[in-house]
Image (cartoon, coloured by chain):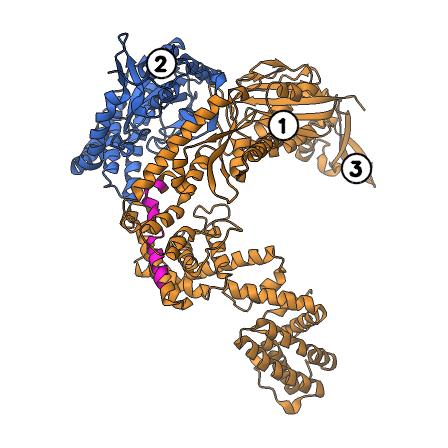
Chain colours: A blue, B orange
Amino acid sequence: MPTEMPRSDAPAEQPPTFQDVIMNLQRYWADQGCVILQPYDNEVGAGTNAPATTLRALGPDTWRTAYVQGCRRPTDGRYGENPNRLQFYYQFQVLIKPSPANIQDLYLGSLEAIGIDVAAHDVRFVEDDWESPTLGAWGLGWEVWIDGMEVTQFTYFQQVGGFECDPVPVEIAYGLERLTMFVQGVDSVYDIVWSRGADGVTFTYGDVYLENEREYSKFNFEVADTDFLFQEFTDREAECLRTLEAGLPLPAYDSVLKCCHAFNLLDARGVISATERMAYILRVRTLAKACCASYMEHVVGMRLDAPEGAEGKGADRG
Amino acid sequence: MASTRTLAFEIGTEEIPAFDLKNATVQLPGLMAEALDAVRVPHGDVIVYSSPRRLIAVVDAVADQTEALDEVFRGPSAKIAFDADGNPTKAAIGFARGKGLGVDALERREVDGVEYVFASRHVDAQRTAELLPGVLRGVIEGISWPKSCRWGTTREVFTRPVRWIVALLDDEVVPVEFAGLTAGNLTWGHRFLAPGPHEVPTADELVSVVEAACVVPSQEAREERIRAGVAAAEAATGYRAELPAKTLTEVVNLSEFPTVMMGSFDEEFLRVPEEIIVDAMLMHQRYFPLYDGDGKLTNKFIIVSNGDPAQEAVIVDGNERVVAARLYDAKFFYDEDLKRPLEAYVERLDEVVFQETLGTMRAKTDRVARLAALLVEQAQVADDVAADVARAALLAKADLVTNAVIEFTSVQGVMGSYYAAAAGESPRVARAIAEHYRPRFAGDAVPSDEVGRLVALADKLDTICGLFAVGQAPTGSSDPFALRRAALGIIAILETGLPVSLSRAVDDALAVYAEAGLDFDVAAVRAQVIEFFTTREKVLLREEGAAADAIDAVLATGVAEPMVLAARVRALESARAAEADTFEDLAVAFARANNLRDPEAGTACDPSLFTAEEAALAEAVDAAEASVAAALAADDYAAALAQLAALRAPIDAFFEATMIMDEDLALRANRLRLLNRFVGVFASLADFGLMSKK
């Protein structure tokens, strides 16, 4: 369906579509030696929570990956009525371990790759330290602004699951909708041009996801069965611990993600009081830390003397 | 003296957080000077420069080399240093090792007839260039940061990754090593306007090379540049900008080459309460809002850019879109919030935890309402005021669960006030909701009327008493609930003359907690809270110039009310200033009498045993007792103090003429009784013994 042309100074040259942005980023980071993964097939609140980041940030081995990740944040739903907020949106996630010395320049290069002339804008790195209470993780870094708009989180991981990261990975998380809105110069996420066919047929973000936002906002806030979700949380917690006993951190971690999502939905349904809230976060953190400890033991191959708060020292592994 | 050179040292980094950078520029001069002093390199001034991506120290007149040093140290006596067989003892070996020598190098010399061992040490002159790599590495490692960052595969820490180092002694590169880097003579400029690398020919040119690469390398210069740009924008519009210190510091340290630009937003958004707009601009985007001649917010704002000034149109356009999106959100939230009356949000306060043991904001609201009612009884305000206090106490926290406050936290209270007005609450209730957080910092205004003051008092006192009751009183460095600020706020509110006794209010607050089922030691917590307020008041009095001994003298009489303490200390200080001699003399006399007095002896004097001086003193004490009591009954402490002056002559005469410890025990006991009565006159006023200079 034809959509009104977005504001553009050079009508002859169309700005990149949403999928162009994604594909250009994938190409760019592939050229930097990253493994281009496909989105993880489990509900996550952020690209960081996918195992390719959370678990593979641990241990001494080199790791480089980049992937698109759909993220679910039930409480951010606005029934499709707010042009800037979504309960489901996309991040483009890059994780490189150890962090390269020229990583800021590499990042700026990625902006050029999607058509942003960084010298013609005000690009800034503004202090924004990151902490995930549910993952027992923290890092130091910035949010990146382009002309005042936050488009990326840039973080040097210091600790994950209570383990010190050594070597240190750098994470770059782009907000794909924000970035594309900036590149295309549109003021509503639903006006983003997702694809443009040679015959002029255009699909917008609204064409693809507006109905999704309406339905899921209603589901998250009004419909999701809270008894079912409370039970799911408890069942998944037990399943996680059982899986860990079998020495399988990767499938165990899936249960952590399920717990997180159940918790987020319960939160959106407004049935978790503030006091309970902290208790649930602690339960998730305990599971996440246990998965990280199991990963350190079974995958990284590190003997752990103290399970709680132990620091993984970077013993070399062949 | 060897010749001198200039040392230029630059730590090039990824973007340093604004406040970390400010702190580091304070630390750096001392660190550099101490590091050079520690290796005995004579040097001139250390000048520090900075930008978000670098810390620079330039030191002039750095000596080429250190001076050679001959040192002689005297050790233990020979008797101790050598055993009977003439072999060195542990003492001798230890002494030699301490000076970096073998025991054979010790010499024996006689001093005043006693033989000692001596160690002589010669340190050659050293080339400064050879010492500097270690010195400068130490400087990098010596800067302290609130959080330390590691990166890559190295173990070193800094606030953010270090990416280059320049270290030059005139034109000689000092090869400092840190985190896998070796210092050189290449620096980097502004990330986009003049990236580099740029070669620095000599140390003296480092700063000019950096400046030429579009970096304004000092906080002062960047601030000046920003202020000049703001002034130009003000002149162009006739508006006035607001530059809060915290945001200004951030902005100064968020750009290497700041350029002031002006943007605007759709006037339609001015219908949204201006506090939200200002919060969105200042807190989130670090823009400075512009106000018109009447102090009303306009739709223009100031952006401080780090980009290319030639790209102003593009940069302003981008920033305007960001503001529009945020204001759209703000307006959306505001309109949503207005769909329900403020009271409807009170129930939802049970979703917000006040403190783990003390429960939710809903529970706090109930307690504050109850406490406010008790304060109203004490203050005996008019019925309409009492009704408004009750209403405002119920609604004070309701806005915490509105969308606008969840999104823009700094507007708590203010939004509640808008929502209250929209829901038809009285203007006084609406104002009290906005103002009950006041005073928020030292020097902030207190709530403007009794309603706001009583609600603020109840809210702050509930917080203080509750946290003390659950053992969360502030410690030396940690005061996470800002209880000291809350206590100072309460004192400021009481200073307005609100007729409320703090100790009674504390009793009420603790009783409300006990009623609510909290288990704690009421008497112990009460004592701690009173002591907490007394300490705050003492600090305030010291800050306004009251002498410590005067404060202690009043406190010794058992005063627990901060307002009474303050009034009495001030009166005592001014009486003492007016009649310095009299007070000094009385203090000495009091101290003397107080040392002699014997409580066992009682106060029943036998006038038939009095000498003339004793009779005169007894008469003066009688008169003073009566007049002090009358003045205190009239709550006139200053007048009570003034009565004491009448005691000076009689007590001096008494001490002059009387031998207290007379051998006649009856006379002695009678005199002690008289002294007891003299001391008793002071008891309710101040412990004058503490004010004696002895």
Residues drawn in magenta: B386-404
Query: Residue tagged by mark 1?
Result: B49
Q: Dot 2 surroundings within 10 Å: few (below 14), some, or many (20 or more)?
A: some
Q: Is-magenta flag for residue B283?
A: no
Q: Earlier in the sequence, mark 1 or mark 3?
A: 1
**B115 displayed left or right of A188:** right
Query: Residue tagged by mark 2?
Result: A16
The residue type indicated by label 3 comes to Glu
Disc 2 on helix, strand or loop? Answer: loop
- For the point 50% across and 57% down, which residue is it? B492
The chain containing the residue under callout 1 comes to: B
- For the point 67% across and 29% down, which residue is it? B47
Q: Same chain for marks 1 and 3? A: yes
Q: Residue furthest top?
A: A198
Q: Is residue A112 above or below residue B647?
A: above
Depth check, front residue: A227 or B600: A227
x, y (%) of residue B599?
Answer: 57, 77
Q: Same chain for marks 1 and 2? A: no
The chain containing the residue under callout 2 comes to: A
x, y (%) of residue B633?
Answer: 52, 77
**B206 displayed left or right of B344:** right
The residue type indicated by label 1 comes to Tyr
Instruction: Find residue B115 and name its label.
Output: 3
Depth check, front residue: A65 or B346: B346
The chain containing the residue under callout 3 comes to: B
**Cα–Cα gap, marks 1 and 2:** 42 Å
Disc 3 on helix, strand or loop? Answer: strand
The residue type indicated by label 2 comes to Pro
